[in-house]
Amino acid sequence: MKYLLPFLIVPAIAFAQAPSQGKMSKQDYFDGIKGRMQQVMALTVPAMEKTQVCLQQAGDKPALNGCIDIMAEVQRKMMSGKAAGHGAQNMPKKPNIEWSEEIKAKMLKDLERALTESKATQGCFGSSATPEQMDVCMKKAGLGR
């Protein structure tokens, strides 16, 4: 996951930043986060699925690193529209990963976990109208605190 984590997390954090409009109610904050995270997940989940298929077929270093390019491109798209301070200067450097069956298997395992969690979170955002509903949904999905 250490190879893919920056490409999965940095855009989500940048998009999920709370607006700086003084004090917000818990519901208003949730509504803002929900809208931004639904946008992020609409881009990242399909890219993660495409990356997963790519990784399953990768048989060498160029192919493996080409798979990482899929997520890097999504990250560039999301980060390019952000305000100063969240742009390209804050994007993690793309790793140059050495290929091995062990690394490929680890990446696939980590990506499967990330996909499962992302899809569960996406479903919870879609079915929750309040922060409390979101908490219950996330706990039922095994992702709660």
Image (cartoon, rainbow, N blue to C red):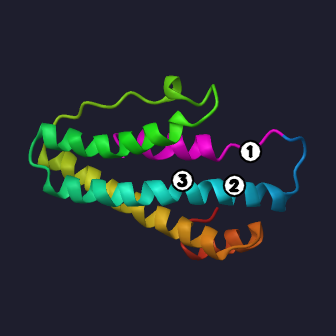
Mark 1 sits on what residue?
18
Q: Evaluate whether residue 2 shows in this view.
A: no
Q: Secondary structure at mark 2?
A: helix
In this view, the residue in front, 139 or 97, is 97
Q: Alpha-carbon distance for marks 3 and 2?
A: 10 Å
Q: Evaluate whether residue 8 shows in this view.
A: yes
Residue 140: x percent and y percent?
Answer: 59, 77
Residue 34: x percent and y percent?
Answer: 67, 60
Residue 110: x percent and y percent?
Answer: 34, 54
Mark 2 sits on what residue?
33
Q: Which residues are magenta?
A: 1-20
- In the image, residue 132 sits, relative to residue 22, either above or below, namely below
Q: Secondary structure at mark 1?
A: loop
Three-letter code for the amino acid on which mark 3 is drawn:
Val
Residue positioned 52% across, 37% down in the render: 79
Q: Alpha-carbon distance for marks 3 and 1?
A: 14 Å
Three-letter code for the amino acid on which mark 1 is drawn:
Ala
In the drawing, does residue 66 fall left or right of residue 7? left
In the drawing, does residue 15 fall left or right of residue 116? right
In this view, the residue in front, 136 or 131, is 131
The answer to whether residue 77 is magenta is no
The disc placed on residue 40 is 3
The disc placed on residue 133 is none
Badge 1, how many Cα within 10 Å: few under 14, some, many 20+? some
